[in-house]
Amino acid sequence: MFLYRVPTLVQWIYPRYVWHMDRSEPKVYLTFDDGPVDGITDFVLDLLLERNMKATFFMVGDNILKYLPLARRIVSEGHQVGNHTFNHLNGWNTSPEKYLENVAQCQRTIEDHLGVNTDLFRPPYGRMSQLQRKHLCKEYRIVMWEILSGDFITGKNVAGTLKKISKKTQNGSIILFHDQQKTAKFVKRILPGYLDFLEKMDFKSDLL
Ligand SMILES: [Zn+2]
């Protein structure tokens, strides 16, 4: 069974990670990983602009260079940028040296090509070794997520998923979507409905 919400136990094991934000205000935190990618990130940006909502994009450095105008559009429209490594590395199969250098390469790409700085990092697949974690915790806020949209699982039912993620959403929730080729079709179908739900429930989208 797919869990849409990260179990409290997992959150408790990694207390230094950010799993959700302040619970006292009706705010949610939309996050998009792996982009920017033509054909989906532009769709997401159009939708957010139309509804005057803000989001955080955990970008892959390599994609920033491939889709530079799109990456710059994210910044110019007031969204937040996070580091998601340069090559979308899995920390579990990568040496600490190589991993940290890849994070630094993404950071330089963000600074040099987008002209912004960020202290936000999200590890691809949520995977890092203890040593990688120890180093990166000193320099970055490590932002995980509370709710998974399940957009990376093929063949998911849109209506059923929308119902489940809406039910799990609460004050301070961080929700994870992916703006990449594999998830594009599903995200295009589910995101408008989820944003409708947020508006209906008077949740504001905020930056991390
Ligand atoms: Zn990713």
Image (cartoon, rainbow, N blue to C red):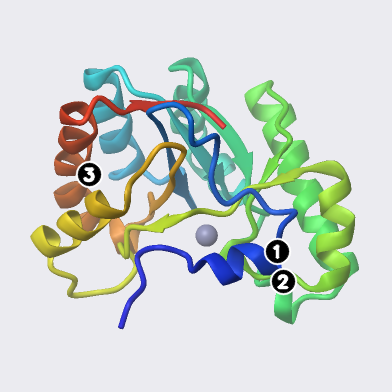
Q: Does residue 169 lie above or below 208 as drawn?
A: below
Query: Residue 96 occupies which quadrant of the picture?
Result: bottom right
- In x, y percent, where is residue 17? 69, 53
Mark 2 surroundings within 10 Å by alpha-carbon count, few (fewer than 14), some (14 through 19), many (20 or more): many
Q: Which mark is residue 56?
A: none
Q: Is residue 95 left or right of residue 69?
A: right
Query: Residue 4 occupies which quadrant of the picture?
Result: bottom left
Q: Secondary structure at mark 3?
A: helix
Looking at the rendered structure, the kind of residue marked 2 is Gly
- According to the picture, the residue beneath numbered tag 2 turns out to be 91
- According to the picture, the residue beneath numbered tag 1 turns out to be 14
Looking at the rendered structure, the kind of residue marked 1 is Tyr
- According to the picture, the residue beneath numbered tag 3 turns out to be 191
Q: Does residue 8 lie above or below 116 as drawn?
A: below
Quadrant placement of the C terminus: top right
Q: Secondary structure at mark 1?
A: loop
